[in-house]
Image: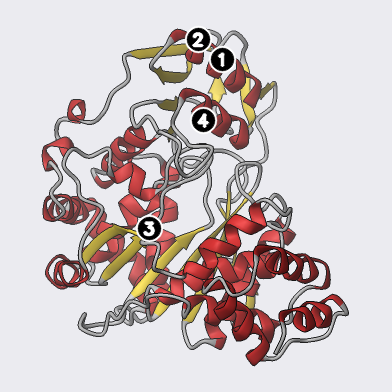
Amino acid sequence: MRMVDIILKKRRGQELSTEEINFFIEGYTRENIPDYQAAAFLMAAFFQGLTPRETGDLTLAMARSGDQADLSSIPGRKVDKHSTGGVGDKTTLVLGPLVAAAGVPVAKMSGRGLGHTGGTIDKLESVPGFQVAMDNRSFLDQVNRVKLAVVAQTGHLAPADKKLYALRDVTATVDSIPLIAASVMSKKIAAGADAIVLDVKVGSGAFMKSPGEAFTLAGTMVDIGTRVGRQTVALVTDMDQPLGNAVGNALEVKEAIDTLKGKGPRDLRELCLTLGSEMILLAGLARDLETARSRLEQILDSGLALDKFREFITAQGGNAQIIERYELLPHAPIAQTVFADVEGYVREIQAEQVGLAAMTLGAGRATKDSAIDLSVGVVLHKKVGDKVNAGDPMFEIYATNRENAVLAEKIIRQAYSIGKEPPVRRNLILGKVTKEGVSEC
């Protein structure tokens, strides 16, 4: 078997065999196939596409290219959650403790973020003392004891995906739905969960800009999960404005704690309850979504989810006093409130621009080796649909220097659109995708 023949076959639009796909992934992972041939394959796949069977085979080959987590020592049905990423997405910080308190074991491997803000691991590193690295035995023991552990994904998990993603990034082949789906699902499958709930973001602050693209991606990932024996559900959710109010690592931790205390933003609470209900159902701990949601609402409102968060933080070496003392989290030396100079209703907030402002402040990283400032970010006081009077606080900027603060203010002012009439309210959840098809939530 020769790589040049595989490239030619895909360039002609022909379907590759399982053996040919395995040959490519194994050879590239072991560095027997050079980057230039892998790049040629990616470009052929980008233009010719991949069939559902090819996409499933590619995903499995990537998942098997490195370590595969064995969660069999954890009793119960393990359900993982993955978000395609967005501005202000701190869902895992609320959702993990919430469903763990309901009895669902959450054994989560998360990554660091590229772009406007850090990933879940960066956010958790805002907590003094929190350890994101853990050996496998300790990881499994903690899930059995606490029902929740979140650790940094190692380079040994789906290494083929890591190599291919870096190559896609420099060969203009990132925005291929089969390749995106295979990348996401290979890591989820290698992480060992029995079932997967996907949160596919769509809008200005998401990778998928149109609902059509988002539903296609969601359907592709659900199909992959189904093909490899993982029950998979995807929700397509709005990211035209940031999720919640806080954008920035330590600021998002604070907002997650507020939400666990019952004082968080409505949209963050709603999304966590909706995703959590799907997780409870897939875990077999509720007969229907209504029962699951009622149970989660009770857990959240009673403080049990907050207690679980405290237990989780303590178990991984973190200082749980942050729950009562936010000043223990990293805090920026400059806090600047920006006030409205017009009257009307917030009609739009360009999430991508708010993310850019956070990046300008230092909350995100341009490359995987970039330094990140855990203290900086933005807190929005007005969201889409809110009434604005001249002089009302619009947003706050947390910065380490005045120059960055001035630039971030300019960017966020431009992100806001204020008009005389209130906008039509957008749904937070646009739809649900299962193996049976698309439905409303």
Label 4 crowd (10 A; few <14 / some 14-19 / many >=20): many
Q: Residue at x 52, y 87 (%)?
A: 228
Give the answer, above or below, for where 57 lies relative to 364.
Answer: below
Mark 3 or mark 4, earlier in chain? 3
Are the two marked residues, 2 and 1, in contact with CB atoms closer than 8 angstroms?
Answer: yes
Q: Nearer the viewer, residue 331 or 295?
A: 331
Where does the N terminus fall, quadrant-wise? bottom right
Amino acid type for the residue under numbered disc 1: Leu
The residue that label 4 is drawn on is 359
Left or right of 124 in this view: 425: right
Q: Position of residue 254 (x, y in %)?
A: 29, 36
Q: Residue at x 64, y 74 (%)?
A: 220
The residue that label 1 is drawn on is 407
Mark 2 or mark 4, earlier in chain? 4
The residue that label 3 is drawn on is 110
Q: Position of residue 31 (x, y in %)?
A: 56, 70
Q: What is the spatial separation of the Cα atoms under label 2 and label 4, in whole angstroms?
A: 14 Å
Q: What is the spatial separation of the Cα atoms under label 3 and label 4, in whole angstroms?
A: 20 Å
Instruction: Kindly identify which numbered label has been placed on residue 403.
Output: 2
